[in-house]
Amino acid sequence: MRVPSLCSVFLIGTALAHGQVDQVTLRAAQQDDESWLMYGRNYSAWRYSPLDEIDTGNVHRISPVWIFQSGVSGKFQTTPLVRDGVMYVTGPSNHAWALDLKTGRELWHYSEPVPEGAVGCCGKPNRGFAVKGDRLYKVNFQATLVALEASTGEVVWEVELADYREGYSNTVAPLIVKDMVVVGIAGAEYGTRDFVDAYDAETGRRVWRFWTVPGPGEAGNETWAGDSWKHGGASTWITGSYDPDLNLIYWGTGNPGPDLDGTPRRGDNLYSDSMVALDADTGELRWYFQFTPHDVHDWDAVADPVLVDLEVDGEPRKGLIHANRNGHYYALDRTNGEFLVGRAYTEVTWADGIGSDGRPILIPGHEPTDEGTLTCPGLGGGHNWHATSFSPLTGLYYFNSSDGCQIYHSAPQDYVQGEFYFGSAMENVSGEPREGSILAVEPSTGDTRWRYPLVSPPSSGLLSTGGGLLFAGTSEGYFFALDARSGKPLWRLRTGGRVQAPAITYRFGGRQYVATASGTAIFVFTLPQ
């Protein structure tokens, strides 16, 4: 780790003296226009800012004011945090930086080597910091959680979440709840048994653990044939949300293991492909909802749980909305997990809708076979993991979708520790390239208001603003803005690198800025003075 200059330490230390981040600050994060304090901006994971200086009438005039080139290769999927004149950014392969908000100048750089033998399904990205007090918290790829001094980047403590030699890894942005750092884990593609953890923010001591695959004697273990629970997966690699009034943490879980071969794991395979609601103080399960029982298509349910109050059939409900990888949009009652709405938003051939009990109405003949089975959606969804957005200005929920089908083949395999445990293979349909789209959906009904087509499957998350805008990016390297009410394209810039991260926005020096990661760089935009 490079030691920061004394000037850098003074600058950041002075900024933090303006006010440390505590639970009161985080609960009020939605009203703080000069900061971005957590992965989803607020505990409800809206990714909406009321800032409106940049709007539908002038967004075509924005341009970069600074660009930070990291010099580190890999997938940049970070959500930067902004606090008192400093931007905190994580990068792939255990890198992180503090940047001067005015110029993009590096104030400090943290790095830790990834151990040889640490494996993961999909590169070594990192999705961001959490902040509490004068500390930052991030995971490292080898399944550790580290606390850093925000002023220097120096390590305060580091704890192991799980043994990376068993196939565990970590890429999630932590969530601060009260005095705890809450994190998920990855590794289902390597036959791990996964969990959600909470750690004391001061000491790093583990406070509680919720196993997303229940063991013997635990409710739900009977949904795993034999001892298949030992390698059942159900990773938790995207940040959850939190309702302080209900004191519930909501977290989405991933695919069971082996991923596409259901033969060794007969049963529904709880709590894979589910939304779980956990007591924030104890980690105990309060309710769950399983979107895809006995998944054999890799349809994770890790996408962010968004908390929105709804009116469904004329009745007010405390809602949780979620665009699922299985091709359906869902609305649940977040107090008890009751199923409210389920509606397909892309081509779906494996189910004939969602029943009144919330279970999919299966169409036979869509399990992987030796010769191959055509099923829609394909392996990546529907909507995958990319951050969604809810705008109280328009009342719409925004998410992206991969639109197309794939051919699923069976390829059974035995579990070997540390080796890929997938159990199948898939291929694209010849002559039918997979495309993508961005959708605006009415949360109470699942009706699609508009759809913006993309030439390839989407790669970035979304941001909505009080200026009536929706920001997104593409695999081809475009960063662009749409009219949030209509989906009309308003502006775009070719950044020169793939945009895989969601944008953020904040006010600094009396002006609104928009920032996003693209390629191996951070781009910051604003209007000309």
Image (cartoon, rainbow, N blue to C red):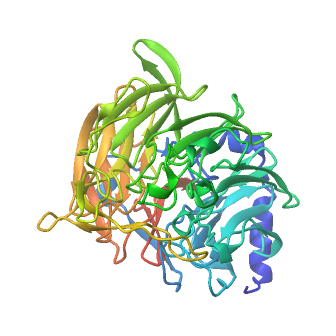
Instruction: Classify residue 274 as left or right of residue 246.
Output: left
- Residue 53 in view (yes/no): no
Instruction: Classify residue 471 as left or right of residue 117.
Output: left
Quadrant of res 229: bottom right
Residue shown at 61% from the left, 26% from the top: 335
The residue closer to the viewer here, 339 or 472, is 339
Instruction: Classify residue 33 as left or right of residue 111.
Output: left
Specify the quadrant that holds the N terminus: bottom right
The residue closer to the viewer here, 202 or 219, is 219
- Residue 212 in view (yes/no): yes
- Residue that extends furthest to the top in the rendered view of this protein: 314
- Residue that extends furthest to the front in the rendered view of this protein: 226
Q: Position of residue 112 (x, y in %)?
A: 69, 82
Q: Position of residue 282 (x, y in %)?
A: 79, 40
- Residue that extends furthest to the left in the rendered view of this protein: 431
The residue closer to the viewer here, 363 or 298, is 363
Residue shown at 35% from the left, 73% from the top: 495
Specify the quadrant that holds the C terminus: bottom left
Q: Position of residue 258 (x, y in %)?
A: 49, 62
Q: Position of residue 267 (x, y in %)?
A: 50, 44
